[in-house]
Amino acid sequence: MELSRIDLEIVTALQENSRLTNRELAKRLGIAESTTHERVRRLVHSRVIKRFTAEIDPVALGRPMQAMIAVRLRPQTEDVVERFLRTVMDDPCVLDATVVSGEIDVMLRVAVASAEHLRTFAWRKVTSTKWVQSITTHLVYEYRARPVMAPSEDKYAG
């Protein structure tokens, strides 16, 4: 799907604040509410917008410590990666998981209450699966997410 300038402005505005009403969005972009409503509906239907969500501070939920856990799986197969992800993703401390290439197969980002909780999660949940060959844990000192994702230049339809 090619995105117009208006589509890109809608996507940018909703990434900054997904709670914008249709009226607020239309006013911000200088277009009719009906146009805004139809474009947002089309962006959702085409899966450009996958979901509307709230960003929560893990500290507010009693999870002040974050870590990245690099996981090496054996054998390296799609089935093993899928099984591993199903095993760990149900734990509430897992913020996200990324399947990567190279020596490491999966990077987990977790938020926990303490070093003890991190150790318990790593030993009881992560290394307890038979496919895990090794893990390396890295404490996160600071985490920054890019608030707005811009399209690549070749996606711009002008």
Image (tube, rainbow, N blue to C red):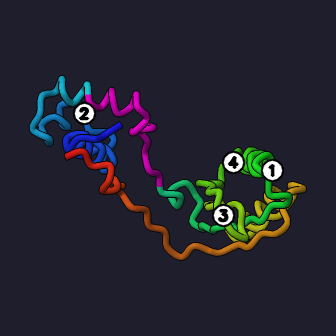
Label 1: which residue? 80
Q: How far separated are the C-alphas under marks 3 and 1?
A: 15 Å
Measuring 43% from the left and 45% from the top, which residue is drawn there?
A: 54
User: Does residue 57 appear in the picture of this structure?
Assistant: yes
Q: How far separated are the C-alphas under marks 2 and 3?
A: 40 Å
Q: Nearer the viewer, mark 2 or mark 3?
A: 3
Decide: marks 1, 2 in contact (CB < 8 A)?
no
Find residue 41 and report its horizontal and vertical position in percent. 33, 27
Q: Between 105 and 145, which is closer to the camera in this rendering?
A: 105
Q: How far separated are the C-alphas under marks 2 and 4?
A: 32 Å
Q: Nearer the viewer, mark 1 or mark 4?
A: 1
Find residue 21 and report its horizontal and vertical position in percent. 25, 33
Q: How far separated are the C-alphas under marks 1 and 2?
A: 43 Å
Label 3: which residue? 101
Q: Which stretch did the figure color magenta?
A: 39-56
Find residue 130 and report its horizontal and vertical position in percent. 90, 56
Amino acid type indicated by mark 3: Ser
Measuring 75% from the left and 51% from the top, which residue is drawn there?
A: 81
Label 2: which residue? 21
- The image's mark for residue 89 is 4
